[in-house]
Image (tube, rainbow, N blue to C red):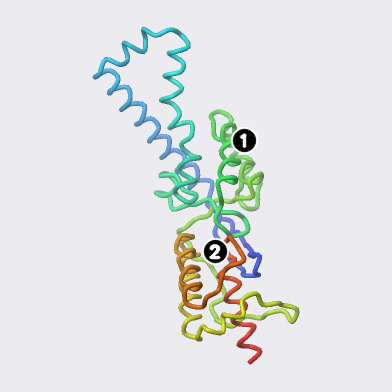
Amino acid sequence: MSELSITTTQNVDINFKAASEGDRVLAYLLDLVIWIAYYFVLDKVFDATGFSDRVNAMDTWSYIAIQTFFSLPVFLYKLLFETFMDGQTPGKRIMKIRVIKIDGYQAGFGEYLMRWLFGLIETTPPLIIIGLIAMAISKKNQRIGDMAAGTAVISLKNNISIDQTILKEINDSYVPVYPLVIKLTDNDVRIIKETYESSLRATDFAMIARLQTKIEDVTGIRSVSANATAFVDTVLNDYNFYTRSM
């Protein structure tokens, strides 16, 4: 299993384990089972209600429109689930893998859309071989859609290695952003860092967002970044800067 080393914009080094081709294929097959089950249930409901007969009696364009409408959940399945389940589909969740940006931050709709568009080709049999070949030759186990979107699929079964100390080396040229971090105590920062690291291990970006809100409430800081991960990174670096200077 390949290791995916990421350095965030705030110089925090994170080592993820890239999801294996086997885990990704199994996640795909699990999602495929859900698609088949959807069509099976839909077919049974249509037969039981007599809707199938009415659809078959429609003109060609109406028939196509009905078929397209009820196929949309499968067609948009990956895009919708990855968007609303933070980079996971049900299959990925079962296999404990997730899509993230290669800068370590949470992917957004734009990245999921790019992956989905390429996935229309890469994950459709028999062209799925294209995605498998791309993953096999990529150092980060990326298919072409991942490369285009700047994403990777990581395994949540493995720990992430992050510097465990509160104090870190900061370049002499480092310029702090939030002077109000001095309102925090060493114990506050220890709790923040432990919460931050455990959230990164689980790729729980919702928890990091709540952590940002808590820090802002306690210190009065107002973030200059829309990214909660970048904000917490900066708070930790700023605290290290100011306490080092004391």
Question: Which residue in the protein does label 2 denote?
Answer: 228
Q: Give the label, 1 or 2, closer to the camera.
A: 2
User: Nearest the camera: 130 or 227?
Assistant: 227
The location of residue 159, given as percent across then percent down, is 49, 65
What label does residue 87 carry, if any? none
Amino acid marked by disc 2: Ala
Sort mark 2 into few (<14), some (14-19) or many (20+) by Cα contacts within 10 Å. many
User: Nearest the camera: 172 or 184?
Assistant: 184
The location of residue 171, given as percent across then percent down, is 72, 79
Quadrant position of residue 170: bottom right
The location of residue 210, given as percent across then percent down, is 45, 65
Quarter of the image containing the N terminus? bottom right
Sort mark 1 into few (<14), some (14-19) or many (20+) by Cα contacts within 10 Å. some
Q: From this view, report whether residue 125 is shown above or below residue 132.
A: above
Q: From this view, report whether residue 224 is shown above or below residue 236.
A: above
Q: In this view, does 175 lie to the left or right of 220?
A: right
Could you tell me which residue is drawn at 64 percent across and 50 percent down? 150
